[in-house]
Image (cartoon, grey):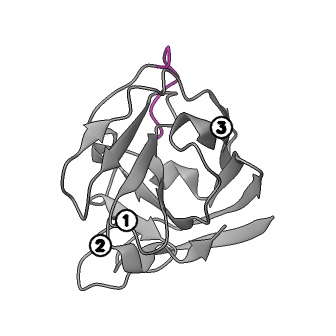
Amino acid sequence: MTAFSLQPFGTPHPDITITGTLEREGNQLAISYTVSGNLNQVIVPPPSSPTRQFDLWEATCLEFFLGQPHQPNYWEFNLSPAGDWNAFHLEAYRQGLQEVEAIKALPFQVHHQQTALTLSLTFDLNQIMATSPALDVGICAVIQSPDLPLTYWALCHPGSEADFHQRDSFILVL
């Protein structure tokens, strides 16, 4: 199991921390996020009937990216604390965006308490790849606040702008 901590891009940002764990056993991937701290500074969308949605990154959204080493293509996963989700495949950096039709649902658990929000997903990688190659992983989040513009959190921010698609930010290897 690998623990992670996300860093905000720039300031100002809400007085929160975003941590979690990532684990892979065979072709099963488990990821868990915890947003803790002053959750009054975070707009958490209310629970809904989970559906595939576009533009989840325009509000509070937890995300991860998977790529195979030395390959230009990669996958993007968006998880809203409301329960909505989406999964995309891209041919190369921000090119050829396609919904992953093989994924019919991404059932994840969300627990919202006064000082912590947790989100956990176990995902079968066989839905997107037939083999079990090594994976480069980028983990990130978009946080909407009532008093601030959207803030962007990631394992690292290698560019001059927040850009979760940069392969240099896929720094965890599974």
Answer with mark 3 or mark 2, whichever residue precedes in sequence. Answer: 3
* 114 or 122, nearer to the observer: 122
At 24% from the left and 65% from the top, the residue drawn is: 93
Q: Are marks 3 and 2 in contact (CB under 8 Å)?
A: no
Q: Are marks 1 and 2 in contact (CB under 8 Å)?
A: yes
Q: Judge from the rendering whether residue 103 lies leftward or rightward of residue 19; answer left or right.
A: left
Query: How far is mark 1 from mark 2, CA to CA?
Result: 6 Å
Residue 130: quarter of image: top right
What amino acid is at disc 2? Ala
Q: Secondary structure at mark 3?
A: strand
* 17 or 53, nearer to the observer: 53
Q: Is residue 103 visible?
A: yes
The quadrant in which the C terminus is found is: bottom right
Magenta stretch encompasses residue 46: yes
| Residue at which label 1 appears | 152
Q: Position of residue 151 (x, y in %)?
A: 35, 63
Q: Nearer the viewer, mark 3 or mark 1?
A: 3
At 48% from the left and 20% from the top, the residue drawn is: 104
Residue 124, numbered circle: 3
Residue 162, numbered circle: 2
What amino acid is at disc 1? Tyr
Magenta stretch encompasses residue 29: no
